[in-house]
Image (tube, rainbow, N blue to C red):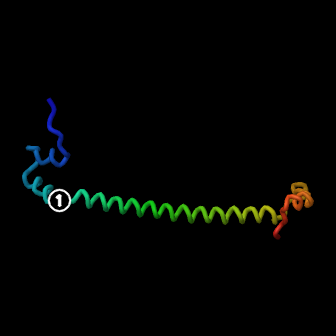
Amino acid sequence: LHDQPLTPLQRLLHSKEIPRAKKAELRELVAPLNPFELQRAMKSKINKIHQFRFLKSSTKKQQDKTTIASSATNAICSPVPVSLHQPSSLLFTKGLTPSC
Protein backbone atom coordinates (compact mmCIF):
# COMPACT_ATOMS: atom_id res chain seq x y z
CA LEU A 1 0.00 0.00 0.00
CA HIS A 2 2.65 2.56 1.07
CA ASP A 3 6.24 2.97 0.07
CA GLN A 4 8.94 2.17 2.56
CA PRO A 5 9.84 5.32 4.56
CA LEU A 6 12.99 6.95 3.16
CA THR A 7 15.03 10.02 3.93
CA PRO A 8 15.16 12.73 1.26
CA LEU A 9 18.70 11.59 0.40
CA GLN A 10 17.60 7.98 0.03
CA ARG A 11 14.77 9.08 -2.27
CA LEU A 12 17.25 10.96 -4.46
CA LEU A 13 19.62 7.98 -4.56
CA HIS A 14 16.75 5.63 -5.57
CA SER A 15 15.46 8.01 -8.21
CA LYS A 16 16.04 7.05 -11.86
CA GLU A 17 15.92 10.72 -12.86
CA ILE A 18 19.13 11.62 -10.99
CA PRO A 19 22.35 10.96 -12.94
CA ARG A 20 24.85 8.48 -11.44
CA ALA A 21 27.52 11.17 -11.20
CA LYS A 22 25.23 13.33 -9.09
CA LYS A 23 24.37 10.38 -6.84
CA ALA A 24 28.10 9.70 -6.34
CA GLU A 25 28.63 13.38 -5.48
CA LEU A 26 25.83 13.23 -2.91
CA ARG A 27 27.27 10.07 -1.34
CA GLU A 28 30.68 11.73 -1.02
CA LEU A 29 29.10 14.80 0.52
CA VAL A 30 27.21 12.82 3.17
CA ALA A 31 29.81 10.11 3.93
CA PRO A 32 31.93 12.09 6.44
CA LEU A 33 28.91 13.38 8.38
CA ASN A 34 28.40 11.91 11.83
CA PRO A 35 24.90 12.61 13.22
CA PHE A 36 26.14 12.49 16.81
CA GLU A 37 28.95 14.94 16.08
CA LEU A 38 26.52 17.23 14.26
CA GLN A 39 24.18 17.16 17.27
CA ARG A 40 27.05 17.96 19.66
CA ALA A 41 28.17 20.87 17.48
CA MET A 42 24.62 22.23 17.25
CA LYS A 43 24.13 22.03 21.04
CA SER A 44 27.43 23.82 21.58
CA LYS A 45 26.42 26.64 19.25
CA ILE A 46 22.97 26.92 20.84
CA ASN A 47 24.60 27.14 24.30
CA LYS A 48 26.84 29.95 23.05
CA ILE A 49 23.77 31.81 21.78
CA HIS A 50 22.06 31.40 25.17
CA GLN A 51 25.19 32.60 27.00
CA PHE A 52 25.38 35.65 24.73
CA ARG A 53 21.69 36.40 25.32
CA PHE A 54 22.17 36.02 29.09
CA LEU A 55 25.17 38.35 29.11
CA LYS A 56 23.34 40.83 26.93
CA SER A 57 20.18 40.72 29.07
CA SER A 58 22.11 41.04 32.35
CA THR A 59 24.04 44.00 30.93
CA LYS A 60 20.74 45.50 29.79
CA LYS A 61 19.21 44.97 33.26
CA GLN A 62 22.21 46.67 34.88
CA GLN A 63 21.88 49.59 32.45
CA ASP A 64 18.14 49.77 33.21
CA LYS A 65 18.83 49.85 36.97
CA THR A 66 21.36 52.66 36.46
CA THR A 67 18.89 54.56 34.28
CA ILE A 68 16.09 54.13 36.83
CA ALA A 69 18.32 55.27 39.71
CA SER A 70 19.51 58.22 37.66
CA SER A 71 15.94 59.12 36.72
CA ALA A 72 14.81 58.93 40.33
CA THR A 73 17.67 61.20 41.44
CA ASN A 74 16.89 63.64 38.65
CA ALA A 75 13.21 63.60 39.57
CA ILE A 76 13.99 64.43 43.21
CA CYS A 77 16.74 66.99 42.54
CA SER A 78 15.51 68.66 39.39
CA PRO A 79 13.72 72.01 39.63
CA VAL A 80 9.97 71.41 39.59
CA PRO A 81 7.21 73.97 40.08
CA VAL A 82 6.53 74.36 43.81
CA SER A 83 2.91 73.30 43.44
CA LEU A 84 4.05 69.79 42.42
CA HIS A 85 6.38 69.27 45.43
CA GLN A 86 5.21 67.45 48.50
CA PRO A 87 5.64 69.45 51.69
CA SER A 88 9.13 68.83 53.05
CA SER A 89 7.69 67.69 56.38
CA LEU A 90 5.96 64.83 54.55
CA LEU A 91 9.27 63.77 52.98
CA PHE A 92 11.03 63.69 56.32
CA THR A 93 8.23 61.84 58.11
CA LYS A 94 8.52 59.05 55.54
CA GLY A 95 12.26 58.89 56.13
CA LEU A 96 13.03 60.31 52.72
CA THR A 97 15.69 62.94 52.47
CA PRO A 98 16.70 64.59 49.25
CA SER A 99 20.30 63.74 48.30
CA CYS A 100 21.01 66.85 46.26
Q: Which residue is mark 1?
A: 29
Number of numbered discs on residues? 1
Residue 68 in sight in this render: yes
Counting from the top left corner in percent of width and height, residue 86 is at 88, 56
Query: In the rendered image of this protein, does residue 32 appear above or below residue 20?
Result: below
Assign a secondary structure to mark 1. helix
Q: Report the residue that reaches farthest toward the top.
A: 1
Work out whether residue 29 or residue 18 is closer to the camera in this orientation and state it.
29
Residue at the spot 11% in from the left edge and 44% down from the top edge: 15
Work out whether residue 20 or residue 38 is closer to the camera in this orientation and state it.
38
Q: In the visual, does 51 lie left or right of 69?
A: left
Q: Report the residue that reaches farthest toward the bottom.
A: 100
Counting from the top left corner in percent of width and height, residue 29 is at 17, 59
Image quarter in which the N terminus is found: top left
Residue at the spot 24% in from the left edge and 56% down from the top edge: 35
Query: In the rendered image of this protein, does residue 47 appear above or below residue 18?
Result: below
Query: In the rendered image of this protein, does residue 30 appear above or below residue 18?
Result: below
Counting from the top left corner in percent of width and height, residue 27 is at 13, 56
Circle 1: residue type = Leu
- On the image, which quarter does residue 98 sit in? bottom right
Residue at the spot 90% in from the left edge and 55% down from the top edge: 83
Residue 81 in sight in this render: no
Residue at the spot 40% in from the left edge and 61% down from the top edge: 47
Disc 1 crowd rating (10 Å Cα; few below 14, some 14-19, many 20+) is few
Image quarter in which the C terminus is found: bottom right
Counting from the top left corner in percent of width and height, residue 71 is at 73, 62
Work out whether residue 30 or residue 83 is closer to the camera in this orientation and state it.
30
